[in-house]
Image (tube, rainbow, N blue to C red):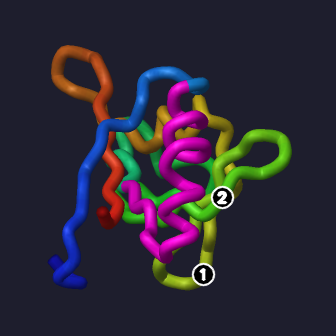
Amino acid sequence: MLTGRQAEVRAIPDSDEALVKELFTELFTEKIAYDKPVIVGSRPVDSGERRLEHGLYGSHAYEVTGLTKDGRIELRNPWGTRHPEALTPAEFREYFRRKRPDGTREGLYTTLT
């Protein structure tokens, strides 16, 4: 809505392999080439947690910016500072998929079409 351009929302895949394949093999490289950001939102801080690990803020938006040579996902904080540490695919799924009341998790990402 901010840009006036069409966007799509997709579910964050359940497995590490599917996550890396979708975000970095099929989608991410195409989106980056055309300046179409991939945006994710971190889950809220759970009761009993003081904060999220890896320098992440709870309930905060981040841009996926790349994949390291060792397979970690790089993120950018839109504030321009305090960028989080790169995350393994499992860590990414932990922090970017919210817990449902039934104990399962769901997470979404957004990108321009």
Q: Which residue is mark 1?
A: 81
**Residue at (44%, 68%) from the top-left corner?**
37
- Measured from the top left, where is residue 94 in percent x and y? 48, 33
Q: CA distance from mark 1 to mark 2?
A: 17 Å
Q: Write down the region rendered in magenta.
A: 18-40
Q: Quadrant of the N terminus?
A: bottom left
Q: Name which residue type carries label 2.
A: Gly
Q: Residues within 10 Å of mark 1 (few under 14, many from 20)?
A: few
Mark sitting on residue 66: 2
**Residue at (42%, 43%) from the top-left corner?**
96
Q: Secondary structure at mark 2?
A: strand
| Foreground residue among 97 and 16 | 16
- Measured from the top left, where is residue 81 in percent x and y? 60, 81
The answer to which quarter of the image holds residue 36 is bottom left
Q: Quadrant of the C terminus?
A: bottom left
Membership of 37 in magenta stretch = yes
The answer to which quarter of the image holds residue 103 is top left
Magenta stretch: dominant secondary structure: helix
Membership of 19 in magenta stretch = yes
**Residue at (25%, 50%) from the top-left corner?**
9
